[in-house]
Amino acid sequence: MIRSVSHCPYCGHLSAGIDDKQLEFVLAPDHGDGQPYPHLAFVWVGLHALTRSCRIVSEGSRVWFWIRGEGTKLVPDMRKAPLAEYVSGICCDDEVEESHPQGEYRIGGASAGGREEERPGSGEFHLHLPSSQRVVAILDGYGIYGPDPDALVAEVRRFVAVITGAVGD
């Protein structure tokens, strides 16, 4: 089943999802050709599989990070991926407002808790893993959109490079 990650706040299209059977990130699942919608700059998705005792099951857990013009990467450790960490921080309001991009942008998506409030079963759901282990999946996912997504990506990259000394992820 394709689970919704983020709809574009400008045009309303479903711009990203995850396939919970294949455990894959899907760009523009309703579009059919996998091409990004015009406003999308970044997508950050965290899928965490948990046992009944709340232990993380690595087989079913992933963090995907999509960057316009570069595609999708799996992020094994957010601390070693400053661009992904920064984008996640903007989406989750972990970054102070002064460190947000100056150009126009909007955020789509929600935390697992926000998804559950809006539509039960969309942020927390059962996941069947290839090992036949049944776990509860927690889905957090956001997209950052703008009227000029290429300029937004460049601005965010420059800012991350300045604050971390890194060139990117």
Image (cartoon, rainbow, N blue to C red):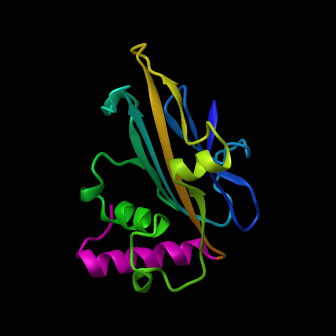
Whether residue 16 is visible to the viewer of this picture, yes or no, is no
Horizontal placement of 79 versus 102: left or right? Answer: left
User: On screen, 125 above or below 103?
Assistant: above
In which image quadrant can residue 168 be found? bottom left
User: 96 or 156: which is nearer to us?
Assistant: 96
Question: Residue 16: x, y in percent?
Answer: 61, 49
Q: Quadrant of the N terminus?
A: top right
In which image quadrant can residue 19 be found? top right
User: 9 or 125: which is nearer to us?
Assistant: 125
Q: Is residue 20 magenta?
A: no
Q: Residue at x 35, y 62 (%)?
A: 85
Q: Overall secondary structure of the magenta stretch?
A: helix
In which image quadrant can residue 100 be found? bottom left
Q: Which residue is drawn at 37% across and 68% down?
A: 86
Question: Residue 57: x, y in percent?
Answer: 33, 29
Q: Quadrant of the C terminus?
A: bottom left
Question: Residue 133: x, y in percent?
Answer: 40, 16
Q: What stretch is highlighted in magenta?
A: 148-169
Question: Residue 52: x, y in percent?
Answer: 38, 25
In this view, the residue farthest toward the right is 11
Whether residue 10 is visible to the viewer of this picture, yes or no, is yes
